[in-house]
Image (cartoon, helix red, strand yellow):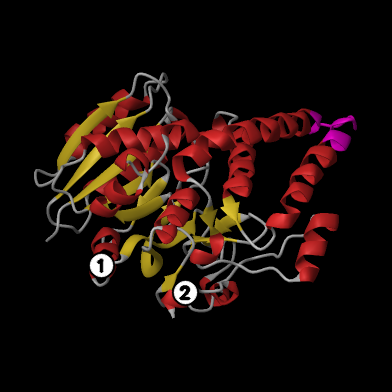
């Protein structure tokens, strides 16, 4: 059996400790030979790290190697996962990244690795991830021509997600639980690490997927029931979701080339002017609108740094969601999105057919 390192990231999880402990327990009991678990803690200050460490030391099977890595600061998803990456077994062929609010299925890692073994060009994969209320959280990730990224079939049932029982190439693997080939990451990513430390949050899995496609590798959804995700328990509790989501989307808009590139400035201007007008209206969300304006400006500044790291990446080299003229008009004028994205809506690249 090939070796694998699984990186499990924690930050101030005391408020949902029951789920965090179920998550780490599921990781310790995977049906997979010869793997290690790397518990990374992002400088938690609520006592959650100590509770998790005690739990792991008590519950750890003798066959599973466990490493604890504690950061001296909160480095977000990107920096935290990179710390785990640096601590992994150098012989590990595969590395899995896992959130602390996702409970994994016992067979998932073995089945995902088996899929990836079948294609040397397949560099990253994720499976079928359910939300905590039973609908689909993600069947892989998509990128659309209007720079919207998200989970395929998110929020719908398996019956509504045609093709969910088949393998598909996708824009990116979902960072809540994804598996990558270590050697490919070392070869293709800046500084040989999967993520860019400074991005912190929400500029990680989508960017990684596009970098891999642009370097000639592939990313896939595998029909493997992978686990249940209690989404955003960390980010929503600490009030950082809005900031990093809009900063990330602004950067992706500026480094990702699509057919809509001539309209890119319209999209950015609409965001700035639209939220400026909304910020003048007294409402509960007034502060949020001001934050979005400031974050968009910060994202434009941050773009130069990221572009120096990865260059310009082309969406058309990956599977993507195309937009018609009507879609663009509805999006620009009425802010009307396409809706739930399914596999049928993904346009595949020529090399994938």
Q: Which residues are magenta?
A: 276-286
**Label 2, label 1: how many angstroms apart (C-alpha)?**
23 Å
Decide: is 288 above or below 343: above
Q: Nearer the viewer, residue 161 or 122?
A: 122
Image location of residue 7, percent across then percent down: 29, 42
Residue 287 location, quadrant: top right
**Going by the image, does 324 lie left or right of 188?**
right
Residue at mark 1: 120
Name the residue at 30% across, 61% down.
108
Name of the residue lying farthest toward the left: 62
Residue at mark 2: 164
Answer yes or no: is residue 326 visible: yes
**Going by the image, does 337 lie left or right of 256?**
right
Secondary structure of the residue carrying tag 1 is: loop
Secondary structure of the residue carrying tag 2 is: loop
Image location of residue 179, percent across then percent down: 32, 55
First-in-chain label (2 vs 1): 1
Quarter of the N terminus within the rendering: bottom left
Name the residue at 64% across, 61% down.
145
Name the residue at 36% across, 63% down.
217
Q: Is residue 346 magenta?
A: no
């Amino acid at each position: 059996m090939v070796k694998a390192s699984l990186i499990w990231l924690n930050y101030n999880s005391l408020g949902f400790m029951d789920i965090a402990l179920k998550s780490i327990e599921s990781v310790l009991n995977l049906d997979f030979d010869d793997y290690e678990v790397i518990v990374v803690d992002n400088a938690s200050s609520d006592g959650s790290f100590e509770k998790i460490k005690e739990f792991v030391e008590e519950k750890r099977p003798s066959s599973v190697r466990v490493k604890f890595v504690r950061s001296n600061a909160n480095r977000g998803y990107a920096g935290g996962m990179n710390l785990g990456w640096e601590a992994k077994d150098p012989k590990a062929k595969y590395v899995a990244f896992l959130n602390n609010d996702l409970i994994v299925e016992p067979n998932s890692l073995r089945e995902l690795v088996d899929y990836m073994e079948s294609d040397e060009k397949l560099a990253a994969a994720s499976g079928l991830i359910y939300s905590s209320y039973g609908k689909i959280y993600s069947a892989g990730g998509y990128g659309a021509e209007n720079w919207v990224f998200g989970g395929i079939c998110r929020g719908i049932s398996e019956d509504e997600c045609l093709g969910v029982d088949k393998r598909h190439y996708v824009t990116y693997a979902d960072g809540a639980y994804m598996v990558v080939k270590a050697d490919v990451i070392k070869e293709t990513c800046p500084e040989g690490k999967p993520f860019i430390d400074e991005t912190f949050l929400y500029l990680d899995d989508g960017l990684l997927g596009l970098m891999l496609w642009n370097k000639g590798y592939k990313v896939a959804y595998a029909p493997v029931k992978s686990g249940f995700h209690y989404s955003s328990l960390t980010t929503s509790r600490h009030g950082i979701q809005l900031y990093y989501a809009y900063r990330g989307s602004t950067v992706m808009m500026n480094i990702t080339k699509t057919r809509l590139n001539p309209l890119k400035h319209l999209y950015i201007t609409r965001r700035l002017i639209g939220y400026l007008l909304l910020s003048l209206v007294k409402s509960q969300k007034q502060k949020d609108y001001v934050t979005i304006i400031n974050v968009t400006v910060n994202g434009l500044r941050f773009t130069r740094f990221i572009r120096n790291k990865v260059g310009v990446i082309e969406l058309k080299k990956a599977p993507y969601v195309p937009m018609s003229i009507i879609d663009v008009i509805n999006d620009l004028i009425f802010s009307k999105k396409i809706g739930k994205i399914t596999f049928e809506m993904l346009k595949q690249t020529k090399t994938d057919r």
